[in-house]
Structures are given as structure tokens and as C-alpha cells.
Amino acid sequence: MQTAVADITDEQILALVKENGQQERGFRLLLQKYQERLYWHIRHMVVEHEDANDVAQNCFIKVFRGIQRFEGKSSLYTWLYRIATNESITFLKKKKKRGADSLDDEALLLAERLKADVYFDGNDIQLALQKAIQLLPEKQRIVFQMRYFQEMSYQQISEILGTSVGGLKASYHHAVKKIERSLTETEG
Amino acid sequence: MSEKENIKTELEDLAPTLAKLKAENLGTGFQVPPNYFRQLTTDILAEVQPSSPVPSVTWYDRLIRQLSTLLQARPALALASVVVLILAGMWFLRTNSLSSNDVPGLALNNEELEAYVLAHIEDFDTDLLIDIYTAGEEGKTEEIMESPLLEENLDNLLLEMDEEEFESLFEGESFDE
């Protein structure tokens, strides 16, 4: 009887990945268990599908190359999200260098691109939400996405980002207030 | 209380509009292409699977490989045939390029040629010989006739003649002026 991917523990995946001749099988299971979650984490951060696809592929290639050295000091879940987050931040920084000069310009450009994006079918309020998120400073944006969309606990976010829970709560509260104000203005 | 509940309560306190939006569960409006995640797995595995390593080939390896190819039965036979044909061709050309003069046993010296001509002088048609000789060589006859070599030969011939032979040359000729 075949075990469902969701039932496979991280420890089993790690054991397979480190076993001679079983690396590919272990990595395939890791992909099946985590690729969709990590893709959406990345997509919420970089927004556009093509960008998310590139970042996700780079992320999993790094995971494959580094997993033999993974010592288990954190959970596999935390380690994977940390890599995905770092890859996304690096990508956004590179993109920002060759893109818009200010957050306002960036948000406007993103809204335009989303309207034309075949992989975005959101309504006006969803578009307004994305625009408001883009106006946030980087750290607040990341914390908001992880809590609001990914529904992570402050503890999980703290482990991934290496930031104190108190600092995260403050960032999230600021982010939520700003977005609320932006949405209220849009509705009004 | 689950984390989901915590987030909902927190939002309702901080941002009612945002809380309402989340409760509607509209999501982000983001989509992916059909079968995207299956394709993503394939793409990632294709990237990470090591391609079979290409062994480095040295000149020595190439030489050995070519030799072993040549030494297989059919190529070796073909090679041997080509070598034999080349050698045979070279021998044939060398043999033909040697003229009869280059063969020591067949060489004739001038004395033998002269003796032959003298012995068979009557076999030659004198007029034909003259025609052939003078054709395109007009002007040279006198030169040859006057050459010291012929005068010397004539002198020798006269010296060798005895008196009767000499007189017979002038029979019927008158020396009276």
C-alpha cells in the first residue's frame, strides 16, 4: 500500500535523501510535499507567475545541492522556507535595481502589469490589496504575506526570518493598519 | 485556539475591512498554468539530475581506438589491399620510366651505329634520306659539307685509296683547260 505524500515525515524524506541510491526518490518526495506551498510563498512575495517560477526553480536547485549538508538544527520546513524567502528577497532587490525609482512608482507599475497578467484574475479590491502591499517596506511586506496569506504563527515566522516575535508583531500591526487605510481610501 | 482563529481575531481588532476581505476567502486572484506543478517537478528534476560525465580523451586513447578499429578483420584486409596496390603501381611506373638507353646491356656506341649504317647503306633510299635531311634544314647542307670534319674524312678517304682507285675516280674526266 502506497503512503500518501502528506503522511511522509520530514525525517523519512531526509533519511532517503541521504541514503545511497535513494537521493532522487527522496528529493522527489520533498518536491511533492513542499513545492506547491513554497511556490505560493514565493508568488506572494514576487507577485508575477514567471518570476515566481524562476525563483522556485532556483530555490529547489539550491535545496538539492545543500540538503546533504543539512544538519537538522532547524526543521526541514523552516530551512526550506528560509531558502525560499532569501531567494525571493534577492530576486526583488535585483529587480528593484533595474526598475522603478520609488515604492509608489513600483506599486503603480505592478498594478499595470497585473491587469495584463493572464495568471491574475482578481477583482478591483484584490488589485487594490496587491497595490497596498507593494507600498509597504520590505520587512513589513514579508511579515504580512506570511501571516495573512500563509497563516503562519509568529513563532514560525520568527524561526524562518530570525527575528524576535515581538518585532514581528509590531511589523505586522503596522502593515495591517497601512493596508486597511489604503483599502478604505480606495473604497471611499 | 488555532492559528487561523488567532489571525482572524487579530485582524478584526486591527483592520475590519481587511478582516472582511479575508473572511470572503477571495484569495489573491493569482493563478498558475494548467498542470503547472507537475511540470515544475519535471523541470526541477531535469535540472538537478547529473548528466553522465564525459570522459576526457587523450591523444593516446584516440590513437589506440583508431588502431584497434583498423586492426579489425575487414578494415585490416582493405588496408592491406590498398598497400599492395600502391606498391604494385609504384613498381610498374618505375619499370616503365627506364628507357632502353638506361639499360646497360642495350646501349649502342657510335662505332657500332656507324658500322651498322655502313653495312646497310644500300638499304637506305638516298633521295628519301636527302629529302628527310634537307626538309626544314635548308641552308645547313652547305654548312655541313664545308665542315672540317667532312674535309678531314675526305682527306682520309683519299689517303686510303690506292693509285688505281684514285685514277678510276677521274676516268672520262679531262684536265685540259
Image: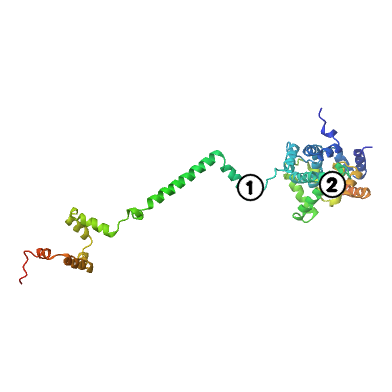
Q: Position of residue B86 (x, y in %)?
A: 46, 47
What colouring method underlies this structural image?
rainbow
The image quarter in which residue A4 lies: top right
Q: Amino acid at mark 2?
A: Arg
Packing grade of label 1 (10 A; few <14, some 14-19, many >=20) is: few
Label 2 or label 1, whichever lies nearer to me, is: 1
Q: Nearer the viewer, residue B123 or A89?
A: B123
Residue B113 image point, x, y percent: 26, 57
Q: Residues within 10 Å of mark 2 (few under 14, many from 20)?
A: some
Side (left or right) of B150 relative to A38: left
Residue A115, relative to residue A98: is it above or below?
above
**Residue B65 in view (yes/no):** yes
Marks 2 and 1 in Cβ contact (< 8 Å): no
Element carrying mark 2: helix
Does residue A129 appear in the picture of this structure?
no
| Viewer-nearest residue: A23 or A49 | A23
Q: Is residue B67 left or right of residue B106?
A: right
Q: Position of residue A34 (x, y in %)?
A: 81, 39
- Amino acid type, label 1: Asp
Find disc 2 in the rendering and name its residue. Answer: A82
Q: CA distance from mark 2 to mark 1?
A: 49 Å
Seen at 16% across and 66% down, the residue is B158
- Residue at label 1? B61
Q: Looking at the picture, how far across and down is residue B157, in whole percent?
A: 18, 65
Q: How many marks?
A: 2
User: Do the residues indicated by labels 2 and 1 lie within the same chain of the protein?
Assistant: no
Chain where mark 2 sits = A
The quadrant of the picture occupied by the N terminus of chain A is top right
Q: Is residue B86 left or right of residue A83?
A: left
Q: In the drawing, what numbered circle is on residue B51? A: none
Q: Secondary structure at mark 1?
A: helix
